[in-house]
Amino acid sequence: DAGVIQSPRHEVTEMGQEVTLRCKPISGHDYLFWYRQTMMRGLELLIYFNNNVPIDDSGMPEDRFSAKMPNASFSTLKIQPSEPRDSAVYFCASSTTLVSPYEQYFGPGTRLTVT
Amino acid sequence: GQNIDQPTEMTATEGAIVQINCTYQTSGFNGLFWYQQHAGEAPTFLSYNVLDGLEEKGRFSSFLSRSKGYSYLLLKELQMKDSASYLCGNLRGQNFVFGPGTRLSVLP
């Protein structure tokens, strides 16, 4: 079975540019999560969806960040404009209520560098 | 992580048993989970507890005391491949919160 798919795996961009990260959850999973991980702040939840509806976006840093889930098999996280402090590894994860929302399957992550 | 405390680093010997503690703020608590993360990789799920007591899963066990805001992850028969970070987290309200992680080094 294919796991969570994220693209791109690496992104290097200049400050001020728009960045779009993409995620395809595991088929049949009804929860989708976006996390950010840095050495300083650890693993932080940005936003999560249940059945394509945003449930909690309290972790979204500011208006520069936005996330969408237009259908059950695709989500995007957009940063516009990007800043150097956005440099981090961004993980997407999915889970299913048939098992537990705690049991999340993480994608390989997107390593974002903003110069 | 918000109000979740774990030791920063631990060292143990191959074949031994190690206990990684986690304390958290009890308000709004809805469940506790543990993840393993090898360096440069994504986290992988280990366990979750919603009720008090010990949950055993092979070499790994997780314990929860809701009244004390305390959990631990017990790793038995340590192997070199268990060298990783172990993240404690909980569901508070509708927010999934992870602790800072404990980096475990298993020595031969």
Image: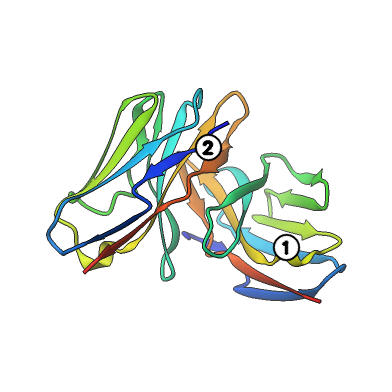
Residue B84 x, y percent position in the rendering: 64, 64
- Quarter of the image where one finds residue A71: top left
Nearer to the camera, B62 or A37: A37
Q: Amino acid at mark 1?
A: Lys
Q: Is residue B42 above or below residue B108?
A: above
Judged left or right of residue B25, residue B104 is right
Q: Secondary structure at mark 1?
A: helix
Measure the C-alpha gap from mark 1 to mark 2: 22 Å
Residue B94 x, y percent position in the rendering: 45, 39
Residue A58 x, y percent position in the rendering: 33, 46
Q: Chain of mark 1?
A: B
- Give the residue at mark 2: A3
Q: Amino acid at mark 2?
A: Gly
Q: Is residue B37 above or below residue B50?
A: below
Residue A99 x, y percent position in the rendering: 63, 28
Nearer to the camera, A12 or B16: A12
Q: Residue at x 53, y 57 (%)?
A: B41
Render colour scheme: rainbow
Residue B84: in sight, yes or no? Answer: yes
Quarter of the image for the C terminus of chain B: give it: bottom right
Q: Chain of mark 2?
A: A
Nearer to the camera, B12 or B95: B12
Asked if the residue at tag 2 contacts the one at tag 1, i.e. Cβ–Cβ closer than 8 Å, the answer is: no
- Give the residue at mark 1: B81
Q: Residue at x 41, y 23 (%)?
A: A51
Q: Residue at x 72, y 58 (%)?
A: B72
